[in-house]
Amino acid sequence: MSTQNNDKQAQSGSNSSRKLKSGTNAVLMIIGMTGLLVGLNWLGNVNYARYDLTEGKIHSLTDTSEEAVASMEDLDIRLYLSKRFPKKLSLQGMPAPIKNVPRFILQLRDRLDEYVRNSDGNATITVIQDDLEEHAAALELQPMVAANEQEDEDTTDDEAQKKYYIGLSLHYGRVEEVLPVIYQLENFEYQMTKSLLRLQDKQRDANVLRDLLDFGKQAHDAVEGCLKTIKKYQVEEDKGDEKEGGLTEQIQKQRTDRSSQVKTYLDNYATIDAQCSRVGKLVSQHRDGINAAASTSSTRSISEEQLDGLVDKIGWFDGMYGAWVASLVNAQRTPTSFQHVAALLDHNEIPARTSALRVIGTWLLGGAGPTGATPLAGPLADRARSAIQKGQADSQPEVRTLAIKLAASVNPAAAESILSEALRDTNPVVRQGALDVALRNKVRVDPGIVRLLLKDRDFSIRQLAIVYLGTNNAASVEEFRPLLDDPDPRVRTQVGIELARMGDVESLTQLEGLLNKIPPQDFRARQLLQESLQKLRDKTSKSAPGDTGTKTETSPRKKSIKAPGSASPVPPNPTEDRIGDIELPDPLEGITTLEALQEDISTKYNGLKDSPGRKNIGFFCGHEEFCPFAETGSVMEKFPMAANLQNEPFAKRALDDITRLEGELNQFNEVIRRFFLSKGYQMVKVEAGKPIDSTLAALVIYGPRKPFTDVDLYRLDQFVLTGKPVVLFMNNYDVTINQWQDKPPFNLTSEIKSTDTNLDAFLSNYGIKNNKDLVMEPERALQSKIHTISQVRTNIGPLLSDAPYSYPLFPKFRQFSETHPLVSSMGETVLPFVSSFSPDRADERGITFEPLITSSEGAVSKHKDFVLDPRRLKDTILAEKVTGPHHVAIHVSGESISSFFAGREKPVAPKADDAETSAAEETKTDDTDNNQRTDRGTVNLVVIGSNMGFECLNPSRLMADFNPMSLMQDKVKGLAAAVPYIVRSANIMARSFLGPQNPRHRQAQAATQLPGQQWDFRMESLEFLFNVFDWSTGSAGLAQVRSKQRKYSQRDLEVTDSDKREAVRWALIVGLPVLFILLGLLRLFFRRNRRLAMAAMNTNIGSPSV
Amino acid sequence: MQNIWAISKREFSSYFNSAIAFIAITVFLVLIGICVFYAEDFLGNNEATLRPLLKWAPLLFVFFLPAVTMRLISEEKKTGSLELLITMPIRDIELVLGKLLGAFFFLLVTLALTLLYPILIDFLGPLDWGTVIGGYAGLTLLGLAYLGIGVMTSCWTRNQIVAFILALLICGFLYFIDWMVGALWGSWASVFAHFSFKAHFDNIAKGVLDTRDILFYLSVVVLTVTVSTFSLESRRWT
């Protein structure tokens, strides 16, 4: 028994150890297998293969990308990633584009790995996660934030505040490119490859531009160093006891603090100036031409221009630095600080010299003032006076004017001679300044000299001369009368006032005529002249009938008559005057100005750094094209008297809104320009009537509406023959749909006008016939929600209906050239109001005519009797004869093509009236005019029959007919052309100034709903536009990268029949399961039958009868 | 090999010899249809793509496939037929592979039925068949991995429900692992993304056959088969 127990125990023990052993083996095997699989997967990560089965291989790199990365040795790719990420990321408040961040990063790494794989070992990736904020600041990476969704309760407050980065920088040789944020993978390849190509261009150009870039960096660093040094001595504000004490104590404390800060700066001036004077030296160095190099390449000239702009800005910084120093001295005038300001008198920049003069002059004249300054005396005073004298001979008129003014004030005895001398100055600024001082300070100057100024070129000088002579009774009516025919109305008005005051009865009729011509809004002038005329009339009625003499002498006036628009009475203390200089900045606020300038300089410097590799695309402007450049100046400058309308409530509101509107339109154009710039296209304005810059990489003429002059055609022709790409977007028709009339009964109307650009013959020379038609696609058009307004009854107002219409005049095109890089990868595009082109003896001329975009065979082309109303068109188009296919975008090319002007006289440009257009400006870009004309050349011209929805949005065009006088009648006239565009871009504002009671408000309101033809397809049009730019700047491969994604991912359902769609839906949801069940039932049925048969067979076998 | 084939055939037949398969597949088809056409508003989006199907099918598989595999070994254990198999010249691995293969054929039938989707979608618009091939390859591999997990959990317990729940949890966890880990330990998220079924599935479903993804899923299958085999073997250890 015990043996059995022992045996059992032994067996049990043996079983346990066997079990343990087996279990351990199993675990080890599993671990081993896991390790093996992990190792295998790791190896698989290092060496792997990918097979992109998609059409167009949208998830693989294109040839362009592969070639780009393969050709770059030692490419350093740095990926900036935050260490932690929230679940979802969005870009600064936009909807969350990244919904699963870990997966996104994995996919991004995957794509980057593709680039590295194709680089044959030349590219490396480094992931940077430390010190991200510093890198972000240096590279201007764009931060993302945790997605801000209301239902997202898991986003903590910390996460909501924090910034996250996913960015890239690419380093190649001396140059770098930055992708500040990556938040979409669909266009990642495009962005990445574009950056690679730009890097290659930059590196190639950087060698050419090395000296410019180095100098730019030096100057930029000098500015940064200067500001840093200044800030080093900034005393921290003691805010602790800010609120203690009463107001007086607080003011006193502030004064003490400021005084202490100024003293600190002045005490450390030597250190500050040692750093900051470098800035001026570098500027001088550049301007003296040490760094100038002949612009042998267009690449270099672009960057030189950038550098010049940067240096100008730095020069201004230097000047403002000088002004700041002057302001410091002004705040604490001591004999020691006098040295600092005296040194500024030799400064290169105007602000520094004028500020120094101001301080010296004020000090000399003011002496002990509120600042408690030590009066200048002895040698210092002599130095001050000689500084002022030196300033009178300064090369800059602003400085001279100030010096003259100060000299006249400091030495009243010599004022007459000083001012008389100044009145003979060649510069009108000085002459005007001197005359003004003479007038205000009542200094008698040689009237003979002043009389000469009656014929001055500058109207304001003539005006002042009249005032001076009149005030001092130093001219006769005979001397004034000829000025009644002065070309400037302000001079005429002024002389009229004087003549009336002088009692010139003979001129009474003329003066009354003059009064009638003064616009009613020019109140002051009218008032003055009226008063004077009234006095004259009174005088005339009192005088004897035969007495028509003109008194030339009148009793001295007790009060001077103010010139219209002149300032308040001249104060006796000229130190308050501001003519010719800038206001001295507050010593502490002056630093803010310097900081703002430094930021501006940084921006310009970045532009310079970025300039290598960037290509300029010229945009022709002047024929009402789409011209995305903000206009300098204001439309309102044409109407100076409009300033007098500020007292009228409606007019004031309207003027404010119009000014703001103008600003918005300019801003819109600027935004477009900067948007293109951010994509790597630098747009340069080419103005009509001026030579075309030969350094341009390509030229775009975008939707002209006005004729080209022969001179412009010639210049264009010569540029075309250089072989550089020229792209012309034709705009054969000017169409507005459902526009309100601007007068009762305010009916809806659609309008179409043919535009005449004088380009048809020009195009014909290059083998292109402009058919001047409109091509429509009855079956394939943009599904636009055309909003229409139905007028039910006049007193109710319009009813808005919002019906979707397929509008054939916004046709969709899907037929693209399969070989041309510009369009071969495109899937679809919309070209509104598009015309077609045909070859015009292209073969004979040796021109290759290649259609880029073609309509379908079912397209309709019309030349007249256009139906524009979408409601009618959808019916009438069905009855039209089909005429397709039509070519709506074409490319012509050829070598040794004859010029349009071959055999003809070269057109002569009219002489510029504007004397300020320097010869340098004329010759700088005047290659096409001054170089030998080309009669044969290479042609590379693309013509597209639509402006793709981009209209001219320049205020000068849209507001060309604006008449501010209409504001006096509570009307706004002349903005009709602008309303649809204005309202689209400035919706609320247009309504606000038009006012709800104004009938035009309905127009504005309706206009907001109108199918802004330029707005509906802007975004789709942009893609084609970028293709065009990429092609025109030589990056044809890049166009393939971008478009490829859209073409193969734009897969719309083509069957629109809702019945068929529903059939598919129910077939899949219900039909398929039901079918499967039926199959199952069928199977069950057959099985059952088979089973019954088998059972029957078995029964038969087992029966006794067998 | 013959044993594996025999077992798989038997398993496959057993599915369709009862109403369970028909019910399960029918429910799956109805649910996927509802998800595609209502949850994803396929017709409203107006895009010829299989993406909605590929988005929801893996999620439904998390429930569907554990249900398919829960009884494979558990039932054998419970009914005692597993002991009977010990007496037969069948190796454990053959048993596991046979069961897995049977379930896999079931999966293929299910996927075959859904082929009507790309066919009809292509009728409506131009479908990229590359993504279809990739999508179905992804579903097949993902499904196979799920089945492997299901067989593994079925080996661990006699209770089918427990097997189902375990498989569901494991499949669900592995599908969303990168998202879940990211919510807790953000810095580890990208590491765990390598283990995410969904991450690998998305790559293949795009239409890109990447050997890394294929290797990953096959590794999961190999690992689960290994664990299942040892689980079965453990009954001999006593």
Image (cartoon, helix red, strand yellow):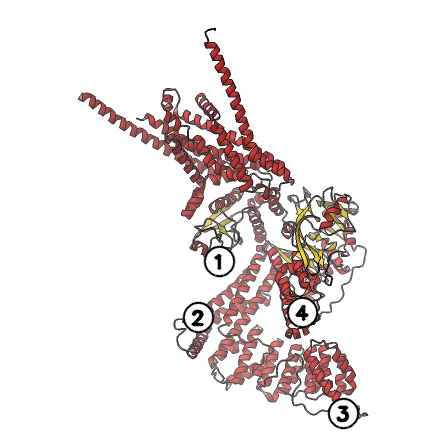
Are dots 2 and 4 on a single chain? yes
Are dots 3 and 1 on a single chain? yes
Work out which quarter of the rendered image holds the N terminus of chain A and state it: top left
Tell me residue A1081's x, y (percent). 53, 25
Tell me residue A713's x, y (percent). 75, 57
Are dots 1 and 2 on a single chain? yes
Tell me the residue that label 4 is attached to: A636
User: From the viewer's perspective, is the residue at label 2 or at label 4 nearer?
Assistant: 4
Q: Please, which chain is the residue tagged with disc 2 on? A: A
- The CA span between labels 3 and 2 is 75 Å
Secondary structure under badge 3?
helix
Q: Please, which chain is the residue tagged with disc 3 on? A: A
Tell me the residue that label 2 is attached to: A233
Whether tag 1 and tag 4 are in contact, CB under 8 A, the answer is no
Name the residue furthest bottom. A544
- The CA span between labels 2 and 4 is 46 Å
Choose the circle earlier in sequence order: 4 or 3.
3
Secondary structure under badge 1?
helix
Tell me residue A324's x, y (percent). 51, 73
Q: Residues within 10 Å of mark 4 (few under 14, many from 20)?
A: some
Tell me the residue that label 1 is attached to: A137
Query: Vertically, is A466 above or below A969?
Result: below
- The CA span between labels 1 and 4 is 41 Å
| Residue A773 in sight from this viewpoint | yes
Q: Quadrant of residue A1068?
A: top right
Q: Nearer the viewer, residue A1064 or A439?
A: A1064
Tell me the residue that label 3 is attached to: A542
Query: Vertically, is A932 above or below A1041?
Result: below
- The CA span between labels 3 and 1 is 82 Å
Q: Nearer the viewer, residue A1047 or B19?
A: B19
Choose the circle earlier in sequence order: 3 or 2.
2
